[in-house]
Amino acid sequence: MLTQVIPSYLYTQYNDDDSLQAFVSAFNGEAQEYVDWFNSVGLPVYTGAPIQGPLLDWVGTGLYGLPRPVLPSGTNQSVGVLNTWALNTLALNTLERIGPASYYATNDDVYKRILTWFFYKGDGQAFTIKWLKRRVMRFLLGVNGTDPGIDQTYQVSVTFGAGNQVNITILNGMRRVTGGAILNAFTLNTVALNTIQSTLTANAPLAMAPVLQAAINAGAVQLPFQFTYNVAIE
């Protein structure tokens, strides 16, 4: 990119006018500041510190086509079905859908994580368990949408249920069975029936887990539409 502007200048007959010379000098300085800013800000690199606030909204919407989403804390509730409303509080044959009462603040950090979820290309475009688990971990750990370098995904469990349901479980700890009523693993009458002994190794808390849960429930992150998603935090 160009680093210097082509300077403006006065016609020769006005060279002796100090006021006009000062105006031209100030104009050239202002133009150079714009060029320096564009060279240093790196507009496409939304993870950078200069891209924040309204400028981030402009970059996310104008360059990437993804406006800042709203993340509801909770799900919609339908009122009107049998046993969902008190007597004389709702007209007969009426159905009301009540939205969540609270919302997560989609601050710059969260917005950048969502942008990275959409546009990160390192995992490819094929939907697999590995693809999903790495995206979940990258969202949880990648401050301001950066890639922290995902080398393991042990805290994320993905299983498939009936009706194309995908169950995503974010684990706050790993429990290992160490003993108990396991076949051929104990002496008779030394362990109570159906007893299991285990140890829990606590993981570092993932503060962004509820935010990701809200983002998936609201459809704010890109996932294949053929499946339904259930997110649990344990």
Image (cartoon, rainbow, N blue to C red):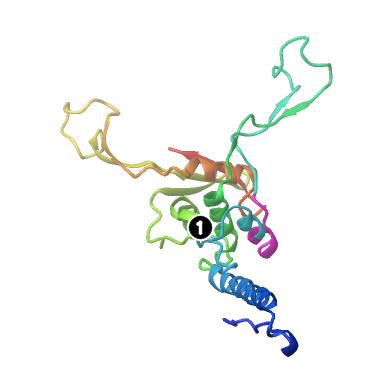
Q: Is residue 156 visible?
A: yes
* Residue drawn at (50%, 40%) of the image: 210
Please provide percent x and percent y for residue 31.
64, 74
117 left or right, relative to 94: left
Single out the residue that lies furthest toward the top. 88
The residue carrying mark 1 is 145
Decide: few, some or many residues near mark 1? Use Cα within 10 Å; few <14, some 14-19, many ≥20.
many
219 left or right, relative to 81: left
Location of residue 59 with respect to 27 vertically, above or below: above
Please provide percent x and percent y for residue 57.
64, 55
Q: Quadrant of the C terminus?
A: top left
Using the rendered view, name the quadrant where residue 163 is placed. Answer: top right
Location of residue 92 with respect to 67 vertically, above or below: above
Residue 56 highlighted magenta (yes or no): no
Q: Amino acid at mark 1?
A: Gly
117 left or right, relative to 80: left
Q: Which residues are magenta?
A: 59-68
